[in-house]
Image (cartoon, coloured by chain):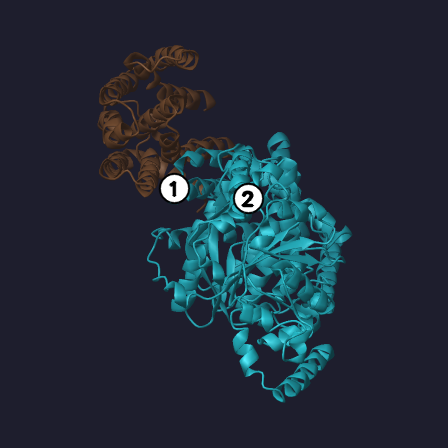
Amino acid sequence: MTLVDGLSWLNAHEHILGSVRLAGGVYLLAYGLFVLAQDASPRAFVRSGLSIAAACVAAPIGPFIAVATITSLTALSWRGGFRNLQGRFVVLWTPALFLFIAEIYLRWLFQTDAFFLHALNASRTTSDIPPIIFAAAAPLAMAPLLEKEGLRRIDITATALVMGGAAAFYALWAPASVIILVMTSIALARAVTSSAPFTIASLTLLCGAGTAYLTTATEMAL
Amino acid sequence: MISHQADTQAHLSAEADDRQTPVSSAAADLEGLNVFARLGRFPIGDDVFGVARELRCLYSDKNSPSPTEKAALGKNAQHTPLRETKLVSRRTFSEALQRRYQEKANDEAVSGLHRTAPAASAKHLMSTGQWIVAIAILASLLVGLAIAPIAALITLNAAATLYLVGAILFRLYLAWSVVDHKLDGDAPAIPADADLPTVTILLPLYRETRSLPILADSISALDYPKEKLDIKLILEADDRGTLKEAERLGLDQQFDFIIVPPGAPQTKPKACNYALAFSRGALTVIYDAEDTPEPDQLKKAAAAFASGPEDMVCVQARLNYYNADENWLTRLFALEYALWFDSLLPALHKMDAPIPLGGTSNIFITEKLRELGGWDPYNVTEDADLGLRIARRGFRTGLIDSTTLEEANCKTPNWLRQRSRWMKGYIQTWFVNMREPSAMSGKGGLGGFLSTHMFIGGTVFSALINPILWAVFAYWLATRSEGVNALFPEPLMTLNLFALLFGNALFIYLAMLAPLKRGWPALSPAALLAPIYWWLTSIAAYKAVWQLITRPWFWEKTRHGVSAASDAKRRAAIARVRAANGVIKSDAA
């Protein structure tokens, strides 16, 4: 059995494995976030990053939104000069980034959609709501660290709330991605050109960046 | 050897003459003088008479020797050797010592290892047996390509792929094995000052006027009893600039100036060997021109030797960079060092594999270092080579929890010069060690054997084949050529995919994680640029191969003191060093 055969088999049994994948994804994501909530050590970031990447395989939408949130926070850290925090965020999303690259390449190579993130296209349904809730909780899970590094609690809470709302909105209604993309562009332009501290509004808009980028880019690429 | 025996006989006969005179009272008179307890490996004796006889001078580090001591020397002295002996400055004494033994020390430095253990020397890159094997492999390959080119190319591809997959899995294993390793683990208790051994510090420099103040300042800041330090500033005879700078800084107050005679090969290991001949310390350590060791590093080394196994003859401190955050190149360089010294080296140590030493901050038991033959003057990564020789001879290298910060190369051409020298040295080291492959594992068994191949030969091999594999991949992406497809039958294709997707991701991620142990997460994002760094490494590898053919022993000099970060350090260091050595401010300009 080749790699493609194996993944095709999984694909063919998606209807049976779907609930298992979803449960696994939720568990892995929850685990990753739990680890971060308990411990902000470098090792916790690594474990959490790998868990989130694994969750991306199991139930892609929610974890990808978590990755998107983290990506947004990375941009925030960079903009705010919190370079240590930025480094840790990069450690968090890099495993998912590698998976994403591998997915695109393997799909193109074998002309199949049977790889790790197969459910990405298919599962824009209410069943994604549980992982989305977990994804939205990512900033809250990291709150102790974020606060220690200088972010305000109100910004962190706002990030979590808006992220959850935007993600749920996206999961239920595809054109939201376009709206989020436009809003994100405006937010990024503001962030780059303004020397003023980040406001909740720009933070809110930035939170959609990763989601819009990853999902839109994936759909376009495939 | 003959000359050594002759010296010894002459000395014994002179000692017999001295026994005919009552010398004990004179010896007591001279007790206060700093006659070096041990003058290197020469048969000069440990007593003042031996020294006086050979050099006609003695040295005191006291500001004013006592009248008794003064009276014991010169024309009024009671004993013959002392009548013709003068009390001189430290530097004059050192120069006299070097003049007396220059020829012998230089001969030992250049030819000692090759004479006593020719198989351990890189003077000749390949042995006869290695030539025969190489020619046989090349001939088989050519015949294969002529008869069945596709099968031959698939075989080559399979060999390269298996190596890459093995390297990926091995690195994964090493990283996993030290996942709980902490940089500040349990350290042995540091002995009391009175119990600390004398340490010789070798500082080999060549055209390092810019780095010298920082180095001198760092060495002065070492937390170690000053009277137990024997510091050798090792300069090449044609390097007047660094000598003048050393004089300007007043370093002759605390350092011995060792001037290495001219002659090929003009390499750092030869200079170190030469200075080793004059070393007095029970331990010997090397620091490079741009080094800033942690102040308690030597004490930690002494503690490690005091509590370590008897077969441990060397300890290696960790290295990293004080200008890690200067630009993308220094960040990647720092990530590479963090991965090597903070993760992979502890993993190798844990599995008892041979430890390829870094070029600096390795501390040896001097006697054992001499027994091992010192450094190979013909090998341009003499450090890695010596680390492997230590393992081959049944000894062990330990690690200490102490870091030396260096100046990372911040300019690409300079980085390429340094890296190509390292690559050339790795090739030399691999060939030298492959003369006796069964001894390569040290005490580490199969793991030790694999690690030596992986980190010495494999480093160069990977760098050489990477561009070829990427070029084939790019060509295939552009053309989807059937010809290329034929070279990747199914099992090989899956392995290649694994190497491409998982291998690259793993190497990048390991580099990303490396600085976290050190508490430098700001460096992690730079790991995403690692593929660019790998390309530079490949360029250096090809340059190294070319140089190995054209100039095998050429030591391509790395320029130090070019970092912006070193400017501020240098200014502060100059002031401190000159003040410490009593150099008045008016001549500072």
Q: Which chain is cyan?
A: B
Q: Report the side of B367 relative to B156 (left or right).
A: left
Splitting the image into 4 quarters, where does residue A61 fall?
top left
Q: Could you tell me which quadrant the N terminus of chain B lies in?
A: bottom right
Q: Which chain is brown?
A: A
- Which numbered disc, 2 or 1, marks the residue that appears first in the sequence? 1
What is the distance, in whole Å, between disc 2 and disc 1 at their CAs? Answer: 38 Å
Give the structural element (helix, strand or loop) at label 2. helix
Give the structural element (helix, strand or loop) at label 1. helix
A164 or A85, nearer to the observer: A85
Q: Could you tell me which quadrant the C terminus of chain B lies in?
A: top right
Q: Residue at x 48, y 61 (%)?
A: B227
Quickly name the residue at label 1: B516
* Pointer 2 and pointer 1 on the same chain: yes
B21 or B432, nearer to the observer: B21
The percent coordinates of residue B61 (x first, y second) are: 55, 61
State yes or no: discs 2 and 1 in contact (Cβ < 8 Å): no
Hey, what amino acid is under mark 1?
A: Leu
- The local crowd at label 1, few if under 14, some if 14 to 19, many if 20 or more residues have their Cα within 10 Å, is many
User: What's the mark number on residue B292?
Assistant: none
Splitting the image into 4 quarters, where does residue B367 fall?
bottom right
Q: Residue at x 63, y 73 (%)?
A: B51
Q: Report the side of A176 relative to B404 (left or right).
A: left
Hey, what amino acid is under mark 2?
A: Arg
The percent coordinates of residue B400 (x first, y second) are: 42, 57
The answer to whether residue B193 is visible is: yes
Residue B498, compared with residue B139, is above or below; it is above
User: What's the mark number on residue B578?
Assistant: 2
Subunit under mark 1: B
